Amino acid sequence: MEERETFRKIVALRMTAAMGITLSFFLSLTGTVFRVLATSQYDGFLIRWLIGFMLSLLISLVIGFIVPMNRISDAIDRRFAWKHKIGAGLLKCLVSNLIYTPFITFFMVFFSYRMARSSGARVAFLPMFLPSFFICFVIGYVLILIFTPLYLKIFTRNIPMGPDQSE
């Protein structure tokens, strides 16, 4: 039993890192692309994206190490006892998205807001945040829906307990 718990922890750590990198990559890219489209300023695109990616990665890893997603997934499975795995998967993705995306989006928009204000721009935070949040929420949900089962299958491939009993 102790070996099984060790495997679960290893899979959970790998999932945290992989999902953090994936969400950070795509959400920071989304934010940077929308900023370019809104302002038509292409200068510093790569630097802005890299800064955004690193900040987003830091936030998502902190969330991932604080919030035990495997326990939350297990609790959802126990609570709803789904007949079809699709419903459970959709709900788990929604819960994960509700945990990660608002924080990542808030801090990324706040970072952009502070940079814009320091440059002398007169912008309000809420009009920047709300559209970004809704766009990133949809994108984050799709990313979690696609990549969670993919990574879970990859990380549990050589583990004796199989993908159904891990994260």
Image: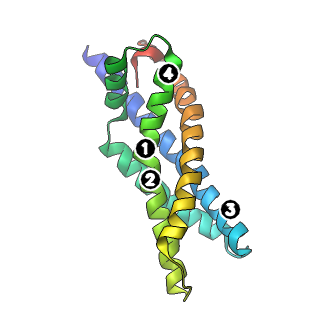
Q: Amino acid at mark 1?
A: Leu
Query: Residue 42 location, x and y as percent?
Result: 73, 73
Q: Residue at x 33, y 31 (%)?
A: 72
Q: Which residue is mark 1?
A: 98
Q: Badge 3 local density, few (<14 within 10 Å), some, or many (20+)?
A: some
Give the mark, 1 or 3, whose residue is nearer the N terminus: 3
Which numbered tag is attached to residue 102?
2
Which numbered tag is attached to residue 57?
none
Does 14 appear above or below 119?
above
Circle 4: element type: helix
Q: Amino acid at mark 3?
A: Val
Give the mark, 4 or 3, whose residue is nearer the N terminus: 3
Give the mark, 3 or 2, whose residue is nearer the N terminus: 3
The way the protein has been coloured in the rendering is rainbow
Q: Are marks 1 and 4 in contact (CB under 8 Å)?
A: no
Q: Which residue is mark 3?
A: 33
CA–CA distance between discs 4 and 2? 23 Å
Circle 2: element type: helix
Query: Residue 6 location, x and y as percent?
Result: 31, 24
Q: Which residue is mark 4?
A: 87
Circle 3: element type: helix
Residue 13 located left or right of residue 131 = left
CA–CA distance between discs 3 and 2? 19 Å
Residue 61 seen by the camera: yes
